[in-house]
Image (cartoon, helix red, strand yellow):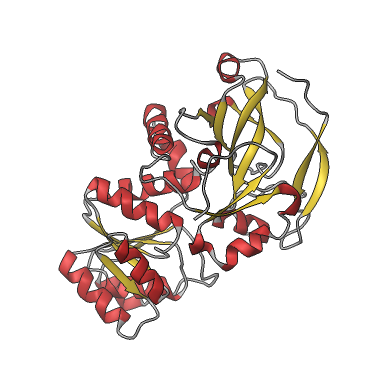
């Protein structure tokens, strides 16, 4: 392996909602059981936007380097058999504490997955957050006996994965979007049930469709008033898994609906769901997500690739049009192997 530098470039958050800063930091050294990954790319996810606002569930000390997932090459390793096995390999990796918006990161070797030969570094960088969330949500629906579910924010990349994963597992998805053009786009892709939440009669249409499909489950990425509208439309005995807060407002509820429908609302967080699984099932989910990156349900559309040096404003640009596709932050000159949407 070539000699490693002693410093690296990284995007640093110094305070919640503060502008990112491009700084020079020491290259971290891997400890026992860890590997040092030279990051090729890392995406911007809604969870990263929450981190920038100081609203993500993991309280990390500031200043911090954001970025929850990425892909790159293992260039050094601490003591440990698994790390030595991965040395020189291209891997996808995830870090609950962030750190991927940098040229190098140390992570536990068990948090890395070698990429199949047909999976590019760009695709591998997006292998954890969205694909595993789609796997988890559909798995929860099936475990609880549901054959239909409502999916909010369905025009985005995760909504697309939920739709495709649902089709694989026999779960019919009612897709909720915000724009007429998104309705047309999803129907052109083959989605059977698509509703525009801003259209007149939306609530009545959603309730009628839930009745027809006997739908008692919803995956809610929005919160706020949307959670109330979901509960009003779902069938009695309904469940809503809230996994996002795009509305950035408190959830609205109606006491009568909660009581007389025997409705349930739960928070869902992948970072807690996945580690609770037995290790063989956890690894099976991770490998399934990785294999599905090339042509499978987990394939993402990429709207922009932004060099690290120009990425200070990339999160706000992504937030303004998330449905257009992912934004990848490129740390160097690696061939990411992805085409722009």
Against 142, is 211 above or below?
A: below
Q: Position of residue 165 (x, y in %)?
A: 32, 48
138 lies left or right of 37: left
Q: Quadrant of the N terminus?
A: top right
Against 89, is 271 above or below?
A: below
Q: Residue at x 25, y 70 (%)?
A: 261
296 lies left or right of 171: right
Q: Is residue 258 visible?
A: no
270 lies left or right of 171: right
Q: Residue at x 55, y 70 (%)?
A: 248
Q: Which quadrant of the view contains residue 112?
A: top right
Residue positioned most to the left: 212
Q: Which quadrant of the view contains residue 289?
A: top left
Q: Is residue 92 visible?
A: yes
Q: Residue at x 74, y 54 (%)?
A: 310
Q: How many marks?
A: 0
| Nearer the observer, 238 or 284 | 284
201 lies left or right of 43: left
Q: Position of residue 125 (x, y in %)?
A: 55, 41
Q: Position of residue 270 (x, y in %)?
A: 47, 46
Q: Position of residue 128 (x, y in %)?
A: 49, 42
| Nearer the observer, 7 or 140 | 7
Against 85, is 59 above or below?
A: below
């Amino acid at each position: 392996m070539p000699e490693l530098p002693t410093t690296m470039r990284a995007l640093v958050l110094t305070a919640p909602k503060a502008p990112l800063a491009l700084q020079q930091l020491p290259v971290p050294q891997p400890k026992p059981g860890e590997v040092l990954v030279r990051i090729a790319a890392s995406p911007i996810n809604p969870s990263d936007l929450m981190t920038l606002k100081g609203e993500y569930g993991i309280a990390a000390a500031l200043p911090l380097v954001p970025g929850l997932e990425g892909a790159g090459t293992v260039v050094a390793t601490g003591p440990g058999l698994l790390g030595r096995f991965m040395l020189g390999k291209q891997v996808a990796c995830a870090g609950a504490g962030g750190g991927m918006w940098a040229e190098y990161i140390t992570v536990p070797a068990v948090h890395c997955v070698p990429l199949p030969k047909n999976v590019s570094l760009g695709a591998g960088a997006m292998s954890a957050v969205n694909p595993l969330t789609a796997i988890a949500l559909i798995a929860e629906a099936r475990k609880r006996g549901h054959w239909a579910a409502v999916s909010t924010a369905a025009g985005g990349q995760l909504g697309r994965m939920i739709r495709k994963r649902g089709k694989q597992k026999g779960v019919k998805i009612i897709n909720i979007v915000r724009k007429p053009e998104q309705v047309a786009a999803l129907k052109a892709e083959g989605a059977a049930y698509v509703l525009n939440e801003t259209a007149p009669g939306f609530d009545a249409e959603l309730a009628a469709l839930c009745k027809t499909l006997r739908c008692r489950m919803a995956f809610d990425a929005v919160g706020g008033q949307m959670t109330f509208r979901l509960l009003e439309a779902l069938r009695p005995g309904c469940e809503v898994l809230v996994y996002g807060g795009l509305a950035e407002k408190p959830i609205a509820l109606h006491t009568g609906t909660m009581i007389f429908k025997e409705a349930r609302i739960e928070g869902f967080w992948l970072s807690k769901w996945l580690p609770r699984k037995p290790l063989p099932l956890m690894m099976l989910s991770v490998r399934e997500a990785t294999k599905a990156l090339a042509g499978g349900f987990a394939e993402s559309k990429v709207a922009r690739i932004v060099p690290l040096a120009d990425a200070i404003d990339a999160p706000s640009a992504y937030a303004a049009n998330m449905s257009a596709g992912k934004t990848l932050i490129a740390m160097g000159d690696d061939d990411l192997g992805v085409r722009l949407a």
